[in-house]
Amino acid sequence: MTSMQAPRGDRLATAVSFVVALQTLAAVFFIGDALVDVRSAQPGLHVATELVIALALLAGVAVGALQVRRLWVEGRRRQAALDVAAGALAAVTAERFRDWGLTPAEADVAVFALKGFDVAEIAGLRGSAEGTVRAQLAQVYRKAGVNSRAALACLFLEDLIPGPVPADRPVSP
């Protein structure tokens, strides 16, 4: 998802809000039409039908409004949790990088590697040679005590996924 793209929950809440607004307009129309019919002394099945439709639409408006509220609240809760997790991961990453004694350049390369960029992409983003990036990655791996990008990523996942590995599951190196 790009930074310009709204999260799925926001798009859903917007769509439901739009439907609720349409239902509100329809309910106002039917109530207004029923009131005009009552004033013109034409009550009957037609007016009763319009009132039932208006009440059903109003019920839909109420349910839709509650749904929109729930979606917005849930979206805010999820965003807050994501912000906390992102902040926690950033703090863990910075602490690990300090513990390993990474240089600022090595830390940049490590972050790009953890984000999934390959050597050529990292070199392009940093304006450096691919050989330099490979050397910096080798230093990161050495200082972290691992031998691959996957193993480096696992060091951070271990901090984020609590609990022991079940005894009945084999652990691969």
Image (cartoon, grey):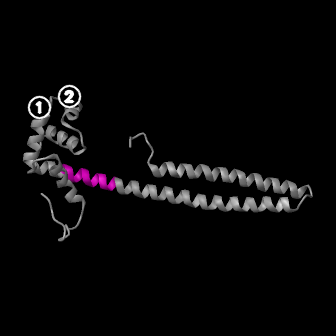
* The C terminus - image quarter: bottom left
Q: Is residue 92 magenta?
A: yes
Could you tell me how far apart the alpha carbons at marks 1 and 2 are, in whole angstroms?
12 Å
Q: Is most of the magenta stretch helix, strand or loop? A: helix
Relative image position of residue 157 (x, y in whole percent)? 22, 56
Secondary structure of the residue carrying tag 2 is loop
- The magenta segment is 83-94
Relative image position of residue 54 (x, y in whole percent)? 74, 59
* The N terminus - image quarter: top left
Q: Residue furthest bottom?
A: 167
Q: Amino acid at mark 1?
A: Gly
- At 23% from the left and 52% from the top, the residue drawn is 91
The numbered dot on residue 127 is 2
Are the residues at dot 1 and dot 2 in contact (C-beta closer than 8 Å)?
no
Relative image position of residue 63 (x, y in whole percent)? 61, 62
- At 50% from the left and 57% from the top, the residue drawn is 71
Relative image position of residue 170 (x, y in whole percent)? 16, 65
Q: Is residue 163 magenta?
A: no
- At 82% from the left and 62% from the top, the residue drawn is 48
- At 36% from the left and 57% from the top, the residue drawn is 81
Q: Which residue is mark 1?
A: 131
